[in-house]
Amino acid sequence: MAAIEGRPVGILGTGSYLPKKILSNFDMEKIVDTSDEWIVERSGIHERRVISGDESNASMSAAASLEAIEDAGLAPCDIDMVIVGTNSPDRLLPGVGPTVQAMIGASRCGGMDLQAGCPGALYGMVAAAGGVASGIWKNVVVVGSEAISRLVDWKHRGTCVLFGDGAGACVVGEYREGALKITHADLAADGEQRELITLPAGLAAEPATEETVRDRRHFIRMNGTEVFKFVNRKIPGYLENFCANCGIKTSEIDWWIFHQANIRILDGIARRMEIPMEKFVINVDKYGNTSAASVMIGLHEAGADGRIKPGQRVLMCSFGAGMTYGAMLMES
Ligand code: COA
């Protein structure tokens, strides 16, 4: 765990993009053997978005980035780096980051993808904060974006009902009055548990063959029950320690922006940590699990609709494939 030192760092602007096409639970009933009742009870999800037409991971990332840049009062030429946290890039080469750099016309900046499971964008924010604090970069666009509907097995009811597409973005830059100040961050992983969520085939370990396609090994596989247990076992204690190291009590956090895996996981965390759910920023009900995008969409929506008020503390926490996790403390 580290306090951010060097130049003070803040979130100068935020944005998001959600695909136009909505798939309700009733639509899912027509695709796999499931029910609205089962999905709502097990996950809290009512509907999710999926890309269609000319929408892509990069187009969502670019739209969210441009909104964040405008919200920050900046222009694309002011951006030094674009970091896209994603687990569903349009292609492995080229990355989404450089594609976004071109799409938004950020002529003098770098672009990269950061793949770290659902915390990918949170990992990206910590990298950006470090780069800004040290003076390497002035303004960094961090995006969480997923076109994950293209990587889920639409014949497997245990996973396809849970995920959705979308993007959220923010500009991380030198702190100024009115911005959310990033004060502390921590990133962690338990790679021993890396087989809990996998996408086995299609890359170097298992290049695509007729057999891998036949066995549907190009889709996300998840041991949902074990993921559920891992998060409930690990995250509450981790966050208690994180807050203690920041010198605050968990009760002093005004808003918790958790990764939106599903409502039962969040409910379990809330009960173990004795935090009222009213302090949680929730979007899993309308977007499903948008993986790396979920916390970024939450950050944008809670800021844009006025939930986050001056003088408040915001804690962002994510967890996912790897298994990776992390937390970041911000003050408005
Ligand atoms: N509709 C109806 N029934 C379904 C279903 C669906 N969409 N998906 C699974 N089922 C069935 C299973 O086949 C099983 O039936 P069976 O007992 O006849 O075999 C039954 O429901 C229970 O399945 P199980 O997987 O044990 O359910 P669960 O209570 O563990 O809930 C999850 C499944 C995935 C919702 C739950 O494990 C979970 O939330 N895990 C965390 C996953 C997650 O958030 N991952 C992302 C982390 S980044």
Image (cartoon, rainbow, N blue to C red):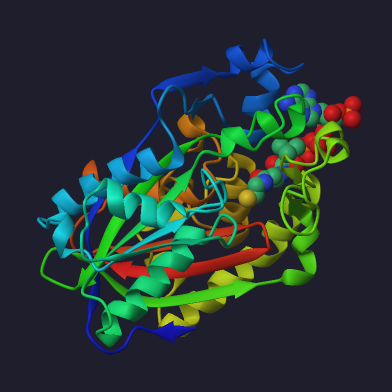
Give the residue at x 80% y 35%: 213
Estimate the x, y position of residue 116 in percent, counting from the top left.
58, 62
| Residue 303 appears in the figure | no
Q: In the picture, residue 53 is in which quadrant? A: top left
Q: Is residue 93 above or below residue 215?
A: below
Q: Is residue 317 above or below residue 25?
A: below
Give the residue at x 26% y 53%: 308
> Which residue lies most toward the bottom here?
6
Estimate the x, y position of residue 64 in percent, counting from the top left.
30, 44
Nearer the observer, 180 or 264: 180
Q: In the picture, residue 44 is in which quadrant? A: top right
Give the residue at x 66% y 26%: 39
Asked whether, in this view, residue 186 is left or right of residue 19, the answer is: right
Nearer the observer, 105 or 269: 105
| Residue 190 appears in the figure | yes
Asked whether, in this view, residue 14 is left or right of residue 244, the answer is: left
Nearer the observer, 162 or 154: 154
Asked whether, in this view, residue 263 is left or right of residue 69, the answer is: right
Estimate the x, y position of residue 163 in percent, counting from the top left.
59, 36
Q: Is residue 81 above or below residue 289?
A: below
Q: Count of labels shown?
A: 0
Asked whether, in this view, residue 186 is left or right of residue 332, the answer is: right
Q: Quadrant of the C terminus?
A: bottom left
In what quadrant does ligand 1 lie? top right
Estimate the x, y position of residue 15 in percent, counting from the top left.
27, 46
